[in-house]
Amino acid sequence: MTASVPPASPPAPTTRRIPILGIIAFVVAFIALAPSLAILLIGFLPEMATIWWLLIVTMPFSIIVGAIALVLAVIALILDIRARRMLVWSIVSLVLSLITVLVPLWLFTGGFSSGDYVANF
């Protein structure tokens, strides 16, 4: 008599964890960017040209909330690299939060001033 061998069990399914901190960082960065972007786009309408002054109000909000999103995105990127998870959400949130922080800071420090261009000529 031959010994019966039990059938092989199917391999355990691999669970893919959702990069929740990267998604949260993306949402926070988008919340920081949305008001300034909306005012910027509305300001291009000829009837709404006087709305540009609201950027003075929304840009500090954008910088502060974008800095929070930047910290969350860096933490998400580090945790996703260590856990070998999908990096897309954390990288996109990192880029979006960098844009959200650096562009308003560039504009506040005279990004479009004529002195930058006159010095080149």
Image (cartoon, rainbow, N blue to C red):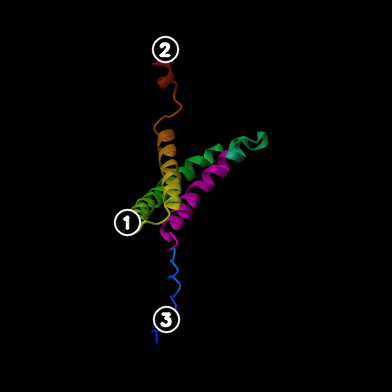
Q: Nearer the viewer, mark 3 or mark 1?
A: 3
Q: Magenta span covers which residues?
A: 17-40
- Contact between marks 2 and 1 (CB within 8 A): the answer is no
Q: Quadrant of residue 84?
A: bottom left
> Number of numbered discs present?
3
Type of amino acid under label 1: Arg
Instruction: Please tell me whether mark 3 sits on a helix, a strand or a loop.
Output: loop
Q: Quadrant of residue 102?
A: top left
Q: Residue at x 39, y 84 (%)?
A: 2
Please, which residue is most extreme toward the front here?
1
* Main secondary structure found in the magenta portion: helix
Type of amino acid under label 2: Phe
Instruction: Please tell me whether mark 1 sits on a helix, a strand or a loop.
Output: helix
Picture disc at residue 82: 1
What residue is pinned by disc 2?
Answer: 121
Q: Characterize the local packing of mark 3: few (<14), some (14-19) or many (20 or more) Cα atoms within 10 angstroms.
A: few
User: Which quadrant: the C terminus?
Assistant: top left
Q: CA gap, disc 2 to disc 1?
A: 49 Å
Q: Residue at x 37, y 52 (%)?
A: 77
Type of amino acid under label 3: Pro
Residue 57 counted in the magenta span: no
User: Could you say which is closer to the camera, residue 89 or residue 61?
Assistant: 89
x%, y% of residue 104? 44, 38
x%, y% of residue 49? 61, 35
Q: Residue at x 44, y 78 (%)?
A: 7
User: Could you say which is closer to the camera, residue 51 or residue 59?
Assistant: 59
What residue is pinned by disc 3?
Answer: 6
